[in-house]
Structure formats: structure tokens, C-alpha cells
């Protein structure tokens, strides 16, 4: 009798264990099925959503390819010096390529752009380079002329005359090509220093130099780079590496 009761009790425990296992398995299966269904449904919903034009990430391009946009009432510029005696300098202002070898309006010496500081339109463009002659200007705004003054084999007098004639409030942009300094004298260097240059008095044979200043500026310009021609550091044989600079020049307020 006792044995029979023990057998029955054991059977009940086994049955309970089987039922519990079945229920647990059913519960887990249901949960997994529900998760799987939710996952698939989520994929369907995502795939069915329309792609809006605003969802596409388009790279933002700033004027002259600057790394960021300039504030209001500022001119965006980007420039590079010449490379040895082979590749001419480049000067971009307000998304307009003003001077470059491709435009065929650069030359050996000092390349200069003059800009009316009160307007976005250009006042004049000058090239201080190899040939001392007039040349047609590209359609880059209100350009008066291109001119050339060779600082290796030319004369500094026309350069001095040009610098003295720059109107008050004019933005000046200068870039070297090949040799910018051999014919420079003290008077020419002082006139450029008065435009805000800190490096012009140290500019030497085949140095590279880029500069943005202005007529009537009261302080030294923050936009200037200068690298010396040195056999120990030159990137090219006889010339230093190319200099590049970008920035935002404030418009004249008075």
C-alpha cells in the first residue's frame, strides 16, 4: 500500500514536471516568434518609408573652396604662391578665380590684385611679372588691366609708381612667383609695409610670399605667409615649397 502511494506520487511529480517543461517551451517559443515578427515588421516599415531629398547628405561647398563660410560683410579668399619657376600663383576672391596660370595672367615677380574694399565688385587687377606690357583681362568683375613688372630683370620704378597710386580703402592681395625681391628697394618695401606687411623687409631672392593687406590699414595684417629660400629646407631645387592661405577679409566700414 505504501509502495503504491509512493509510485503514484512519483508519477504526479513527473507529470507536473512534463507539463511545466511544455508550458515553458511554449512560452519561450512564443516570445522568440514575437521578437522575430517584430524585427521583420520593422524591416518592412523601414523599407516602405519613402526617401526624401532632405535625407540625402550633400557636402556644403563654400566660396573659393574655403573650409567654412565667411561672416556677413566679409570677402572670402584663397590664394597660393607660385611653385618654383614652373607653376604660377593662384588668387581666388568671392568664388572668382582672379589670377592663375590657366588664365594666363600671372608672371615672374609679384602678382597683385586690387579690390575695392567697399564693394564685392573688383576695382582692378595688376600682375607684376615678366613682360612689361598691357594684356587683356579675364571676365572676373570690374577689372581695369593686367600689368607686369619683373623683379629679377625689370625696373622697380613702375612698381613704386603703381603702389603710390593705390586708392584709400583698397584691399591688396599679393603672391610671389619665381623671384619677387631682387629689384625691390627700400622705397618699394616701405610702400608695401604701409599696406600691412610684416615680412616685406625680409623678403629675399626666390623666397615664397603671399599677403593680403589694404591701403589705410592701421595695424599689421594677419593674412601673410613667408618662407625663405634655403638649400637645407627647399622642396624644389633652388626654391621653397608652395604657400597656401585662405580667410575672410572684412569690408571697409567707412
Image (cartoon, rainbow, N blue to C red):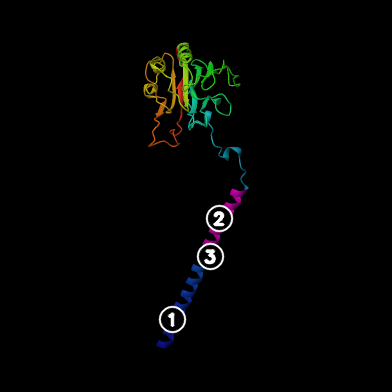
Tell me the distance, in whole angstroms, between the alpha carbons under discs 1 and 2. Answer: 43 Å
Is residue 162 highlighted in magenta?
no
As measured in the structure, the alpha-carbon distance from the residue carrying label 3 to the one carrying label 1 is: 28 Å
Give the percent coordinates (x, y) of residue 227.
40, 30
Circle 3 is placed at which residue position? 29
Kindly indicate whether the residue at mark 2 contacts the one at mark 3 (C-beta within 8 angstroms).
no
Q: Residue at x 53, y 65 (%)?
A: 29
Q: Residue at x 49, y 26 (%)?
A: 77
The numbered mark, 3 or 2, whose residue comes first in the sequence reads: 3
**Quarter of the N terminus within the rendering:** bottom left
Dot 1 alpha-carbon crowd within 10 angstroms: few under 14, some 14 to 19, many 20 or more? few
Q: Is residue 198 above or below residue 52?
A: above
113 and 133: which one is in front?
A: 133
Residue 182 spot, x, y in % from top left: 43, 22
118 and 187: which is toward the camera: 187
The mark closer to the camera, 1 or 2, is 2
Q: Which of 192 and 12 lies nearest the eye of the viewer?
A: 192
Within 10 Å of disc 3 (Cα), the crowding (few <14, some 14-19, many 20+) is few
Mark 2 burial class by Cα count in 10 Å: few <14, some 14-19, many 20+: few
Residue 44 painted magenta: yes
Query: Which circle, 3 or 1, is nearer the viewer?
Result: 3
Who comes first in sequence, dot 3 or dot 1?
1
Q: For mark 2, what is the residue?
A: 39
| Between 12 and 218, the one nearer to me in the picture | 218
**Mark 1 highlights which residue?**
10
The residues tagged by marks 3 and 2 sit, at their Cα atoms, a distance apart of: 15 Å
Report the magenta stretch's main SS.
Answer: helix
Is there any visible trace of residue 159 in the rendered image?
Answer: yes
Question: Disc 2 on helix, strand or loop?
Answer: helix
The magenta region covers 27-47
Amino acid at each position: 500500500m505504501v509502495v503504491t502511494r509512493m509510485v503514484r506520487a512519483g508519477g504526479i511529480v513527473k507529470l507536473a514536471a512534463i507539463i511545466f517543461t511544455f508550458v515553458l517551451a511554449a512560452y519561450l517559443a512564443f516570445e522568440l516568434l514575437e521578437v522575430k515578427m517584430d524585427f521583420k515588421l520593422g524591416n518592412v516599415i523601414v523599407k516602405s518609408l519613402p526617401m526624401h531629398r532632405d535625407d540625402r547628405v550633400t557636402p556644403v561647398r563654400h566660396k573659393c573652396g574655403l573650409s567654412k563660410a565667411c561672416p556677413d560683410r566679409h570677402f572670402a579668399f584663397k590664394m597660393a604662391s607660385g611653385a618654383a619657376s614652373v607653376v604660377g600663383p593662384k588668387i581666388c576672391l568671392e568664388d572668382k578665380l582672379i589670377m592663375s596660370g590657366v588664365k594666363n595672367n600671372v608672371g615672374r615677380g609679384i602678382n597683385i590684385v586690387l579690390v575695392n574694399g567697399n564693394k564685392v565688385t573688383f576695382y582692378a587687377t595688376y600682375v607684376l611679372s615678366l613682360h612689361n606690357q598691357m594684356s587683356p583681362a579675364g571676365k572676373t568683375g570690374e577689372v581695369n588691366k593686367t600689368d607686369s613688372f619683373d623683379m629679377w630683370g625689370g625696373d622697380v620704378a613702375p612698381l613704386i609708381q603703381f603702389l603710390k597710386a593705390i586708392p584709400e580703402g583698397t584691399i591688396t592681395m599679393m603672391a610671389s612667383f619665381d623671384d619677387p625681391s631682387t629689384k625691390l628697394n627700400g622705397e618699394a618695401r616701405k610702400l608695401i609695409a604701409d599696406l600691412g606687411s610684416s615680412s616685406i623687409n625680409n623678403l629675399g631672392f626666390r623666397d615664397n610670399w603671399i599677403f593680403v593687406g589694404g591701403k589705410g590699414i592701421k595695424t599689421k595684417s594677419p593674412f601673410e605667409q613667408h618662407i625663405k629660400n634655403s638649400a637645407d629646407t627647399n622642396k624644389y631645387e633652388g626654391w621653397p615649397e608652395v604657400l597656401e592661405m585662405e580667410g575672410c577679409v572684412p569690408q571697409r566700414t567707412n
